[in-house]
Image (cartoon, rainbow, N blue to C red):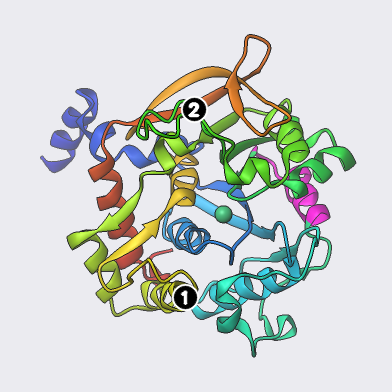
Amino acid sequence: MIRKIILLLAVIGVVGQLGCTHSLSTKGRPIPVILDTDIGIDIDDTWALALLLASPELDLKLVVTDSHDTVGKARLAAKFLQCVGRSNVPVGIGLKQDDVVGPQAEWVKDYQLSSYAGTVHEDGVQAMIDVIMKSPVPVTLIAIGPVPNLAEALRREPRIAERARLVVMGGSVDRQYNDKLGRCAEHNVIQAVKAAQIAYGAGWNVTMAPLDTAGIVVLADENYARVRDADIPLPKILMENYRIWSKVSPKYDPSCKSSTLYDTVAVYLAFDTTLCDMRKIRLRVTDEGMTEPHEKGKLTHVAMAWKDLDGFYALLADRIAGYRRSDR
Ligand SMILES: [Ca+2]
């Protein structure tokens, strides 16, 4: 009887809406993904990593650190993965630019990469290429920072564009939510404009979470409280990092709400898009770092607005607050 009801619901599309998170997985199998992240600068990368680990539609094959001190960032990613019981995930060190780790450096001051139980790739760009080229199914590359690693990977092995798709947090397309600013040169683009021009314009399928949608995500109220108060490792370690990070960014108060969680939207778009108003727009990255519509631009799937932002908040809280390693 229950099966009949489920079948009936499926036919009329109700299951598709309630259980909408499987819409992009391949034949029910988790989607292989690589996370390219500047974790440590803003805290939202850590939230995004938490959401990714707590999303059964996604199979995290590799985390590669991008921008600034990629070695320090690899220590941060590795310690986080280890603390939440996911040291099965390899960590790759991306192209190093400087010695800046960011406000979460305090959390890893005594942690050595050599103590990571999982694999550490000294050449994270090559590891990224290898995962993509060896995968029997297309890999989804989730980029939540500036993208020098991606530009370098495309330079070394252009065929990755045929075997991967890109989901990126970056850009600002219309930004109607803030009339004062209008479209602007978004951080991840302006930090490495040439790389963004190469990666956002490459031959792969590109999905974008621009500021228009990613820039208004702040978890608060009951949904935030569930994550803050959850007594299991993933949310506890996340909150530990948020409290350390907020010492350097005191305008954020971990007792009542999150900071802006830009990067979580890119992770969400890697497995589902139904909560967003998606548009196909030809975009080009200008030398000034703008992502503007242009007739010769790259056809991009852009999350232009939220259809159900409250639904996304509930998903974010449900997953992070409810994550247990044994669920995987
Ligand atoms: Ca980021």
- Whether disc 1's CB lies below 8 Å from ligand 1 is answered no
**Where, by quadrant of the figure, is residue 81 drawn?**
bottom right
Q: Which mark is residue 144?
A: none
Q: Does residue 137 show up magenta in the picture?
A: yes
Q: Which span is picked out in magenta?
A: 125-138
Name the spot of residue 86 as percent of width and height, x first.
Answer: 54, 72
Name the spot of residue 82 as percent of width and height, x first.
Answer: 56, 78
Residue 140 seen in render: no
Give me the C-alpha separation between circle 2 and circle 1: 30 Å
**Quadrant of the rendered image holding ligand 1:** bottom right
Q: Nearer the viewer, residue 227 or 114?
A: 227
In the picture of the structure, the residue carrying the numbered disc 2 is 302
**Where, by quadrant of the figure, is residue 127 drawn?**
bottom right
Q: Does residue 293 show up magenta in the picture?
A: no
Mark toward the start of the polypeptide (2 vs 1): 1
Residue at the location (28% across, 32% down)?
Answer: 16
In the picture of the structure, the residue carrying the numbered disc 1 is 241
* Crowd tier of the residue under label 1, counting other residues whose Cα lies within 10 Å: few below 14, some 14–19, many 20 or above: many
Instruction: Note whether 174 is above or below 314 in the view shown.
Output: above
